[in-house]
Amino acid sequence: MEFFRDTDVVVIGGGIVGTAILRELSKYDLRCLLVEKEPDLAIGTTKANSAVCHAGFDAPTGSWKAKTNVRGNALYHELQDDLDLDVKWCGSYVCAVTEEQEEQLRVLYDRGLANGVPGLKILTGDEVRKEEPNLKTARAALWAPTAGVLWPFGAALAFARCAVQNGAQVIRDCAVTGFVKEEGRVTIVQTTKGAIRTHFVINAAGIYADRIAALAGDTSFTITPRKGEYILFDKTAAPDLVWSVVFPCPTKTSKGILICTTTHGNTFIGPNANDQEDREDTAVTPAGMDEIIAGARRLVPNLPLGAAITEFAGLRAVSSTGDFVLGASPVPGFLNAAGTQSPGLTSAPAIAEVLVEALGQEMVLRRKPHWNGRLPRRKAFNKMAPSEKQEAIAKNALYGRVICRCETVTEGEIVDAIHEPVGARTVDGVKRRTRAGMGRCQGGFCGPRVVQILARELQVPVSSIVKERAASRLYYEKFAARVPEEEQ
Amino acid sequence: MEQYDVVIVGGGPGGLSAAYSAYENGARKILVLERDRELGGILQQCIHNGFGLHHFKQELTGPGYADRCIALIKDKPEITCLVDTMVLEVKDDKTVTAVNPEKGLFTVQGKTVILTMGCRERTRGAIRTAGERPAGIFTAGAAQRMVNMEGYLPGKKIVILGSGDIGLIMARRMTLEGCKVQAVCEICPYSNGLTRNMVQCLYDFDIPLYLSHTILKIKGKDRVEGVTIAKVDEKMRPIPGTEFEIECDTLLLSVGLIPENELSRVAGVEIAPFTNGPKVDQHRQTNLPGIYAAGNVVHVHDLVDFVSDEADIAGKFAALEAQGKLAPTVQTVAVRPVDGVRTCVPQVLHLPEGGEATRLFMRVGAPARKVTLEVKCGGEVLVKRVFPVVKPSEMITLDLPAAKTALMSGEITVGLKQA
Amino acid sequence: METKVMNCIMCPMGCEMTVTMEHGKFISVTGNTCPRGAKYAEQEVTDPKRMLTTTVRVHGGLLPLLPVVSADVLPKGRVKDCVDCLRRVEVQAPVQAGDVVVKDILGLGVDILASRDMESVVS
């Protein structure tokens, strides 16, 4: 068999969990590789979720969820500077709006203490309203100062870039199609780009983790996709909403419909929680919109719905075991980091530690002597002082050409985002890395220009540039399109 | 810091006309800053004809109109045009900071500044639709640029939402490019485009127009596969049971234009309600002394000819002010649209001794036939004009003779009366 | 006798007119407010004409496309043929507004002209 890569560890899935694991692995003297089926990292569950860095009082004490949540939260505090993370430590409130719920806060408080969450406090409604005046209905709230909001895509990209700068590899557009075992042990990963020889496989395939596990012969768990829908508001609406993270009292299936202002300053409401069969359906539904509006109104009665700018939905990977599925599996050489629904984003760096520890049970791990955990700083053009702008343009004239006028993103930044490690190859990839197209005009002006820059820099035809996934092609050649045979 | 008599932000028809008018009226150092790679603005992508009948007394295409504007200012040493240049900030002290690859970041000082940034298109955010967020949804103008200037098609089977002129023009364009335009869908019970465009862009090609219909859902995860549309009631709410699907790979949005006023807002320019543009006087001066505005940045126009007319005014008075020749104001008069008139520009008159001939530019709220437009001051009708037909999509104008303006004080109203 | 309903496009009034014809020949029109409407109606039912604007490929110019316009109106039924013909036309920059891109297109007696200047760009 021909191999296109020969490695020690293959991580399957480039979401927040897979990239965190790859970074952790890159600390050791290992050949490690991450495969992602999509053209960009972190466009599954990591792309559409609540972006909250939870404090850790929700999950049952002793569960993987509880342990990795509290540890993960602490790790983000440690990592934020080295990885230049976009994170806002604003704290979170769980609001009680009935007497019954006030009792529930006490249960959460006690569980938080048992889980090791620092700084928890129960506040009166008036104390809450000093910070969040729009929470008119709150009778009391559980205040968790360690909670925050982070930008999930940015975190996943930072993990991946850190891993790559320490020798790990990331291969995108590379879907796993099967495994080959030798004497019961997984030794070869078959992908759409060819076969990879390896000693270990770590499965962080999110919504598809059970399918990947089954391909390897591990049927110990299944994944149910649970859809969550959201409504995003314009930045101008934040004063009418909240500045931090505000939850209702939780239910059995979810933490409820929360209100949260992101690191970019936009407030969102959501998610609802509906289990479904379909692993691809992230369509927004009218019923879902009604549900989250009703939910959010219980916390902020006067929602500024006129300032809503978009709706979106994501799928959480809910495991049949009721907890994260972490570590060795029944199949030798195959490890899982699966079922990482909430608080998966918060837990990711801690999950990475758990997985590497599990790997350490099966092989000798040696730390690299010169591992570099610090990413180079980068400043957006529109955040630069005039002298910095001048300097950037002097170095590269493309910094003098503004492509996205709503967010003042320059051609230089876009070109850099394409050529950086794990760079952008798609229009949405450029948008996530540079903010080009995120503004008021939603890419109406800069979208076509971004397509042309991508085509030029990647040296491919404009008609091959996609918005997000492989089938999301944007433009057709005007003249070639006239040939009747084409694509018939 | 380089000094100019007039600094003009935007090199589309408004900016170019303002530059030429400023030159004609004595300004001798004029700077035009344009963000695109060439002058002419959106006209360069509007390759169809029908422009210029009023302003140049000749029917031109969009690029032809732009060429005429460019020809007027070309080779004049008094006028400098910088393309590929983005203005980052305009300040109320009339300094303008811009950036381009050659000069880097630079700031210039104007004696006066004219804002001619034009407008932008409303996006998908303006319509609430269920479904995924696939590729294949474009604003009509963005698609027009790709088709007419860059050589790419946005898709092959098209549905257009909105029957404004850009939507209609694109229906014809896409058909001529060999695409199939499945439908044009309009939420209003009437089209928002010119009758000529209805006939020549839709009827000529048997493209179905669904009035009082809107899009509820977009089908497709990666690329658009179809849309669900439904009839709406008189309050524009979808009527259950009227839904049907249309297959398409592309949705073009022609759902309105918004004046581009981010720079104006940051500068401190007062923005008027309804027009969403700067509040201006008859010289197109904003609330900030020495800062003028003209064209689509002030209010969205139906004809570029009116943009030029308005920019001529702004250019003239900005030039006069730069030379200290602006006549002092003796009377300030507010202009208030009433009874069927939705917007009126200018919103205020700063009248010199003896009054000043002034043209009012208005849009009505709903279509009507046989109406009289009346300008009243203190209950007395000063000027009136009869219109056989008025439509929200077509701007109407009314000229106030200088002698009549001399009679005004306090506030005038402009309103429609059934004739 | 047959009738056809159409909107007049001669002015913003947009009168709805009813044209009566017999064996394809114009007989009369009602609903118009002015003589221009009547003239348009007759023209439209007997020999409708349209202006044509489209683009052709241009090499060595600032843009890859050159907008073009017919010098006069063309028979409505031949517009698509003209567009198909122009799709195969390629020109070299520089071009000046008004330059003839195709002379007497499809023998219809109408030239196709460049709508704008297109400077040549040395790449």
Image (cartoon, coloured by chain):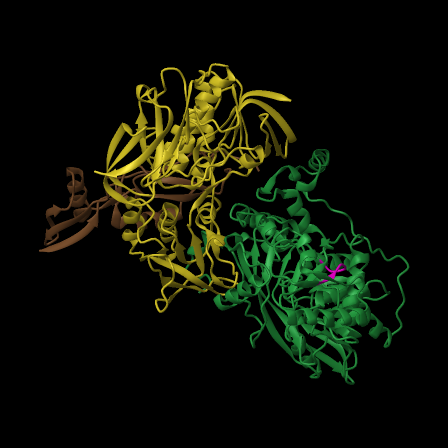
Chain colours: A green, B yellow, C brown
Q: Nearer the viewer, residue A40 or A157?
A: A157
Tell me: residue A55, above or below residue A364: above
Q: How many marks?
A: 0
Q: Nearer the viewer, residue B45 or B261?
A: B261
Q: Residue at x 41, y 60 (%)?
A: B215
Q: Quadrant of residue B206?
A: bottom left
List x then y, in percent, for residue B65. Answer: 39, 33
List x then y, in percent, for residue A394. Answer: 71, 34
Q: In which quadrant is the C terminus of chain C drawn?
A: top right
List x then y, in percent, for residue A82. Answer: 80, 53
Q: Nearer the viewer, residue B167 or A487?
A: B167
Tell me: residue B368, above or below residue A310: above
Q: Residue at x 90, y 67 (%)?
A: A366
Tell me: residue A376, above or below residue A323: above
Q: Quadrant of residue A136?
A: bottom right
Q: Quadrant of residue B310?
A: top left
Q: Residue at x 45, y 64 (%)?
A: B217
Q: Residue at x 63, y 75 (%)?
A: A253
Q: Please tell me whether residue A145 belongs to the stretch shown in magenta.
A: yes
Q: Please tell me whether residue B49 belongs to the stretch shown in magenta.
A: no
Left or right of B199 in this view: A260: right
Boundaries of the magenta span:
A142-148
Left or right of B370 in this view: B83: right
Please say whether residue C102 is visible from this viewpoint. no
Please say whether residue B169 is visible from this viewpoint. yes
List x then y, in percent, for residue B165. Answer: 36, 45
